[in-house]
Amino acid sequence: MQSNPPSPPKLQDFSQAAIQRQIVRQGLSHWLTLYPPALALPLGFAAYLFNTPLLYLGLIGGLTVGLGSAIVNIFFRGETLSARYLQQLAEGTQAQKAQFLESLRRNLAQAQRITGAESSAEQGLEQFERMRAKFDKLGSLLATRFQQGELSYGRFLGAAEQVYLGGLDNLQRVAALLESVGGIDLAYIDKRLANLDKPDSEADRKEREALIRRRKLRCEQLERVDELLAANEEAMTALEETVVAVAAMSTDTALARGDFETAIAQLQQVAARARHY
């Protein structure tokens, strides 16, 4: 049996909280934070054991170096560590994302074949291609406006990827919903209901109620599909607006900082709404 492809990065991996946690983690795991205190502790134990005050200087020095390294990395190298984390996150998930995209394409194509809702499945496939094209367009534009190791580049790309992945998650749910109603034959239901317009027996009445419930279930699932597809249209609009905004904004003025934050915040809000769906 074919195994499922690994999942792409989660939306929360690109959040400010996740970035801050990574800064703290890298600051605390830096070799200058770990090794000097590790070497100093035996000196402190030896100083206590052999009553050698001079060795306490080694203990104090090692602990000071470790604490200083943690402070410098967390509070003064945060931008560098953030940019490195975002770059590693993007580079390390390209293969996973490629497998995920191929799996999603197959699922949507299969849903188009097995369901009577061809228009919804076709729209999902079109959104799949359009969202990828818009995300790639924004990524190319960001690469021309920022240095790839720059924090602004990483945060912009991370926020855009949140929107993109949220749209892909929606399409995955669209495929699952369409597949779930693929076995509900609406033509058969309508034909049977027409024959049971005036039920003659208790069995006919029960069959009619079951058919009505099945038709209602199908309608509810397709309404859910429409909601998810509409949310994706909003996401694509946000990506387009960001492309226009990035192309127009300056990258070398103090005023641009507010423009950056506004554009990033807009993308993150759209991603949050995608998670809500």
Image: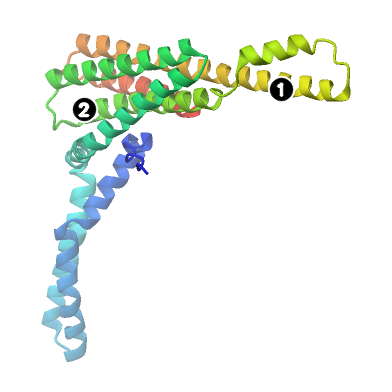
Res 180 seen here: yes
Q: Residue at x 17, y 85 (%)?
A: 46
Q: Are marks 2 and 1 in contact (CB under 8 Å)?
A: no
- Report which residue position mark 2 lands on: 152
- Using the image, determine if residue 27 lies above or below residue 101: below
In terms of sequence position, does the residue under pointer 2 or pointer 1 come before the other? 2
Q: Which mark is residue 173?
A: none
**Residue 64, quarter of picture:** bottom left
**Identity, as a three-letter code, of the amino acid under mark 1:** Arg
- Using the image, determine if residue 210 lies above or below residue 81: above
Q: Can you name the residue that lies furthest to the right here?
A: 201
User: Mark 2 and mark 1: span between their CA atoms?
Assistant: 52 Å
Q: Position of residue 254 (x, y in %)?
A: 20, 20
Mark 1 secondary-structure assignment: helix
- Report which residue position mark 1 lands on: 213
Q: Can you name the residue that lies furthest to the bottom here?
A: 50
Mark 2 secondary-structure assignment: helix
Neighbours of disc 2 within 10 Å: few (<14), some (14-19), many (20+):
many
Camera-side residue of 81 and 203: 203
Q: Residue at x 23, y 14 (%)?
A: 246
Is 127 displayed left or right of 226 in the figure?
left
Camera-side residue of 207 and 49: 207
Camera-side residue of 210 and 170: 210
Q: Residue at x 37, y 44 (%)?
A: 1
Neighbours of disc 1 within 10 Å: few (<14), some (14-19), many (20+):
few
Camera-side residue of 136 and 44: 136
**Identity, as a three-letter code, of the amino acid under mark 2:** Ser
Q: Position of residue 63 (x, y in %)?
A: 19, 67
Res 277 seen here: no
